[in-house]
Image (cartoon, rainbow, N blue to C red):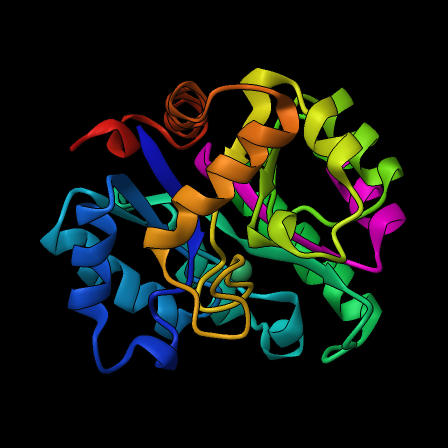
Amino acid sequence: MLVDTHCHLGDVAFAGDRTEVVERALAAGVAHLVVVGESRASTALGLTMAEADTRISTTAGLHPHDARTWTDETAAWLAETLQDPRVVACGEIGLDYHYDHSPRDTQRLVFERQMALAEAAGKPVVIHAREADADVAAVLQAFPAVTAILHSFSSGPALFDAGVALGHYVSFSGMVTFRSWALDALVRATPPERLLVETDAPYLAPVPHRGHRNEPAYVRLVAERVATVRGEDAPSLMDRTGQNAQRVFGDRVGSV
Ligand SMILES: [Zn+2]
């Protein structure tokens, strides 16, 4: 069961052919797609897509880039939206000290607020971490009851070790196919029951599509590369990562 655990189908890059992109993924053997809601607009679109097709789920949250837009009204919206059965996680949330689109103290506050809302709703969180490993690890440690997915993992061993020690999931993207990828050791070190694969489409298209728009059908290329690195056969890796996705996101992800 191949699952793309992270794709931004609400992105404007898919405005013209969203239906065809989903159809191509299903035709390529992708059993379920988790559409990421990193804003109210993308969450609304994800909810609509998930309403029309049970092979699609969505998440809800506010990206760290936009943390400065957080208000009490955002908190009320997120608390209510996390109750929706189509919403399988809170995210993507986290910290991004590379772009610093929002002040760092605001990012940390909004990250913690969303962790608390996820805990109250009993939903896992999808974590974006960029050049903020120590602070992300500290927030995860402050919320030990919240299960996290370290999405498109490309951080250092300290955040990896902290996440694995807390029982969190590690999701790898098309970056594993890049010539510059240097974290095969962490791909191998991920516990088998904590491993996930994703595209992060429209970003990070795997080789041989690098430089072009990514789409969920290409998650197979990610899974094949991860299987090769781990010395496993691809079909069983796809099955196991699919079971992991079902365990962390809930039974909706198992419906086909
Ligand atoms: Zn993403």
99 displayed left or right of 7: right
Between 96 and 173, which is closer to the camera in this rendering? 173
Give x and y (percent) for residue 235.
Answer: 38, 23
215 displayed left or right of 18: right
Q: Is 194 above or below relative to 46? A: above
Q: Is residue 150 magenta?
A: no
Between 165 and 197, which is closer to the camera in this rendering? 197
Q: Which residue is at 83% across, 67% downward?
A: 105
Q: Is 70 above or below relative to 123? A: below
Give x and y (percent) for residue 78.
Answer: 44, 57
Give x and y (percent) for residue 184.
Answer: 74, 36
Quarter where residue 227 is shown: top right
Start and end of the magenta stretch? 120-141
18 displayed left or right of 138: left
Q: Which residue is at 24% across, 39% downward?
A: 29
Give x and y (percent) for residue 52.
Answer: 10, 55
Placement of the C terminus among the 4 image quadrants: top left
Q: Is residue 124 visible?
A: no
Q: Can residue 160 be seen in this view?
A: yes
Q: Is 181 above or below relative to 103? A: above
233 displayed left or right of 80: right
Quarter where residue 252 is shown: top left
